[in-house]
Image: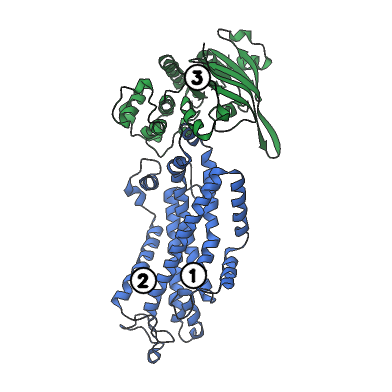
Chain colours: A green, B blue
Amino acid sequence: MTQLLAVSGLNKTYADDGRTVHALRDVSLHISVGECLGVVGESGSGKSTLVRLLLALERPDSGEAMLDGVPMFQLKPKELRAMRRHIQVVFQDPSAALNQRLPIWRSIMEPLDNFPDEKPAFLADVRHSRRETAVRLLEMVGLQAAHLDRYPHELSGGQKQRVAIARGISLGPKLLICDEPTSSLDVSVQAQMLKLLKELKRELGIAYLFISHDIAAVSMMSDRFIVMKEGQIVDRFARGQLLGEERHAYTRELVAAAT
Amino acid sequence: MKSALSGLLRPYGGWSLRSSMRFNPLTAIGASVLTLIVLLAFIGPLLLQNDPLTVNMSERLLQPSWQYPLGTDHLGRCMFSRLAAGARTTLGIAALALAAVTLIGIPIGLLSGYRRGRIDAILMRIVDAVGAFPDFIMAIAFTGFLGPSLTNLMLSIILVNWIGYARVVRGIVLAEREKEYVLAARAAGCSSGTIIWRHLQPNIISPVIVLAALDIGKMILIIASLSYVGLGAQPPSPEWGAMLNDGRPYFQANPSLMIYPGLAIMLVVISCNLISEGVRDRLDVKGTVFGKGGGAR
């Protein structure tokens, strides 16, 4: 399989009240085109830091991430901005991830407004207005045109997360980072959301970095997954490896907690 | 401007213009009083053509009459005309100063909060240094140093008051810029300008309006106080604080010379505070910035 993203030796520390906190220690991973890599870990395991680095919102202390062979952390600001369309994100809390003051179609169209010449193939036949493009995106995530002018507070949590997913796929990214996309949702809605993400992955061929503290959800979504604790990768699961074969003590705890 | 306005009138999207215009009764009273004073200040001189500066010693200290609705002062000048002219001076200077402090404070707060790092450290040390002195003392020192005049008074007010806006705006920007919708906007390739204008600006506009409404009362008080002690408006120009000082020697025989300007200052300041309170409640500005009110988002 063609390699999409290769992360090697990522380190990141924060200064917190004079103490140095190691958010990431020597993290290396790779994701192939169209593959879903799961990341399991509790809060404070460095998952969010990993997300922020891969979105190029921050720079690592050391280490590099190659996206399609391009070193991300050596890009100039202009090149970085052009690269952003390849990696998009769906955050945990859709209420926080959508600007409450904008109607949802404005939120959905924000990435495409920034890259008007980068319409992905699945939107190529939508020729007319931005609103029509937004309708198409809404329909792809199971919402309707009627939702176009709603504000986030008028939608349910699941609907808001669908809007966030629509925004995430709107540029046809190569990698969609899902940072605990189901954790803030009701249990019944969580399953729908996972189903939607799976369908989109199959239809659009997007690779996922699927992050969750729920090892069951991760193993269901992912082709492979890694387990993180205190900024380090403590366990790796290859394709088809079963949960019973875990080697690291921490992984056993996670599995025990989930079942 | 459209997004600023819609953000203000419909902070959570669903509000109508009418509901945002419904203020509590005290605020309505404050707004009416202030409007009345402003109207009197501007329409009064058209109805009553007494020159506020003309000295007429044969008509000094007169009781109210049709010619002089509030009587005359110790130099025979029409009190009403002087109060109206004073309102124009005081309110005009306060408005100018307010425009200046917001124009200085908001960009500095945005820059500081958005860029963080060294530039933030430098700007905030300057803010701390200015804020370390009580603003009244700063204003006295400044006008004392540059010489007493209304222009210098205004400059000193600007010098002292921009820091409030820089602080409030910086605090909001620091909190908002880490929220996921801002991160999502950055990941979506928005430029800093777009993020500041589309996502951060609607958050700062309400607190800034509340702060401005509070400040204008405070500024009017400083203008009047410094003019009273002779550091602001110079005689014979009519200014409420200076008029208070003019009337002081005649207080026992003719208290109205002090009562009218004092009343004017009091009414305007109270009105401004009532308005700011109503605006704060209406805009639902969070309690952390201003101590009171607010509520869940």
- Inspect the image, locate mark 3, and give the three-letter code of the amino acid beneath it: Tyr
Disc 3 secondary structure class? strand
Mark 3 Cα within 10 Å, few/some/many (few <14, many 20+)? many
Disc 1 secondary structure class? helix
Disc 2 secondary structure class? helix
Residue that carries the numbered disc 1 in the rendered image = B151
Please indicate, yes or no, whether residue B246 appears anywhere in the rendered image. Answer: yes
Q: Residue at x 39, y 23 (%)?
A: A120
Depth check, mark 3 against mark 1: the one in front is 1
Q: Quadrant of residue A205?
A: top left
Residue A18 placement (x, y as % from top left): 71, 39
Q: Toward the viewer: A79 or A240?
A: A79
Mark toward the start of the polypeptide (2 vs 1): 2
Mark 1 Cα within 10 Å, few/some/many (few <14, many 20+)? some
Q: Looking at the image, is B247 positioned above or below residue A128?
A: below
**Residue at the extreme bottom of the image, as rendered:** B58
Q: Chain of mark 3?
A: A
Q: Looking at the image, is B257 positioned above or below residue A54?
A: below
Q: Quadrant of residue B54?
A: bottom left
Alpha carbon separation for disc pair 3 and 2 = 67 Å
Q: Residue at x 45, y 70 (%)?
A: B265
Depth check, mark 2 against mark 1: the one in front is 1
Alpha carbon separation for disc pair 2 and 1 = 21 Å
* Number of numbered labels in the structure image: 3
Residue that carries the numbered disc 2 in the rendered image = B41
Alpha carbon separation for disc pair 3 and 1 = 63 Å
Please indicate, yes or no, whether residue A182 appears anywhere in the rendered image. Answer: no
- Inspect the image, locate mark 2, and give the three-letter code of the amino acid beneath it: Ala
Depth check, mark 3 against mark 2: the one in front is 3
Residue that carries the numbered disc 3 in the rendered image = A208
- Inspect the image, locate mark 1, and give the three-letter code of the amino acid beneath it: Thr
